[in-house]
Image: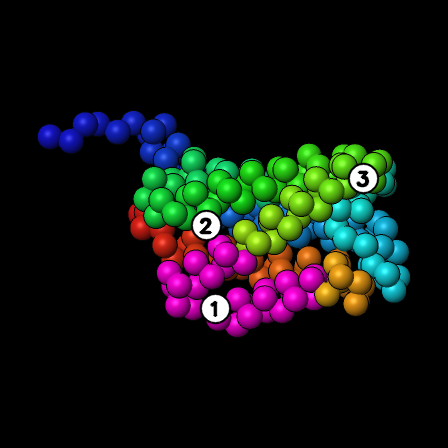
Amino acid sequence: MHPKVTRSQVSRYDGTWRAATLVAAGQWGFAFGVALCVVLRPGFVLKANEGGVSNYGVHVKTAVPYYLALSVAAVGAYLAATHARDSTKLPPQLRALLLCYAVLIILTLASTFGYTLDTPQRDVHVGVGIALTVFQVVASLWMYRERRGDLGLVLVQLAGVVVAALTIVGLIRLLFASEIVTGASFAVLLFRTTRELSTGD
């Protein structure tokens, strides 16, 4: 005999988001926050020597949307791995990927505070940024291997990484563009992989 399920229990279960929905909410929140930063201070991305997304985190006018954007992305990934309706049914590797991504985004956020003040803090921030980029590439290759889909997105992301590397060595100045290309392609891959590898009802 099945235990009786109350109306409140059903409502609570039905109102729980799936992991893919939480990932999507986090990534859309991130995109909206960065877009708002660009609207508020477009000079960073319009000048020839464009800066990175982190520049928005050290100016009063754009600090709030910048920090909210990163926070929402991190929280979305964390909740997808731990509190979604189907989080326990995600492959362990995908849950670890989501948690690692959340940690790296938080580290990016935390290291933004003082990265313009001195060289050690700048080096920490740059190191975190490099770690995040490498993680996204490795994670994207793993997601492609698991699904055998979206090869185009993987190639776009790799192209963005090449542009970022050329920017770091000083051959070109397209840091913001490379960050957006790699971040956007990773976001789509992460959502699609979470949706397809989830076996929750």
Could you tell me residue 114's position as x and y percent? Answer: 79, 34
Q: Is residue 176 above or below residue 17?
A: below
Q: Distance between the Cα atoms at labels 3 and 2? A: 39 Å
Residue 170: mark: none
Q: Which residues are magenta?
A: 137-165
Could you tell me residue 131's position as x and y percent? Answer: 60, 48
Query: Circle 2 is placed at which residue position?
Result: 20
155 magenta-colored = yes
Q: Is residue 189 visible?
A: yes
Q: Horizontally, is 171 left or right of 12 in the view?
A: right
Quarter occupied by residue 106: top right
Q: Is residue 178 visible?
A: no
* Foreground of the two, 40 or 51: 51
Local SS, label 3: helix
* Foreground of the two, 112 or 119: 119
Q: Residue at x 87, y 64 (%)?
A: 48
> In the rendered structure, which amino acid carries the disc numbered 3?
Thr
Characterize the local packing of mark 1: few (<14), some (14-19) or many (20 or more) Cα atoms within 10 angstroms: some
Mark 3 and mark 2 lie on one chain; the one further toward the N terminus is 2
Mark 3 and mark 1 lie on one chain; the one further toward the N terminus is 3
> In the rendered structure, which amino acid carries the disc numbered 2?
Ala
Nearer to us: label 3 or label 1: 3
Nearer to us: label 3 or label 2: 3
Q: Horizontally, is 18 left or right of 3 in the view?
A: right
* Foreground of the two, 100 or 37: 100
Residue 150: mark: 1
> In the rendered structure, which amino acid carries the disc numbered 1?
Asp
Q: Is residue 137 above or below residue 159?
A: above
Of the 4 image quadrants, the one containing the N terminus is top left
Query: Circle 3 is placed at which residue position?
Result: 119
Local SS, label 1: loop
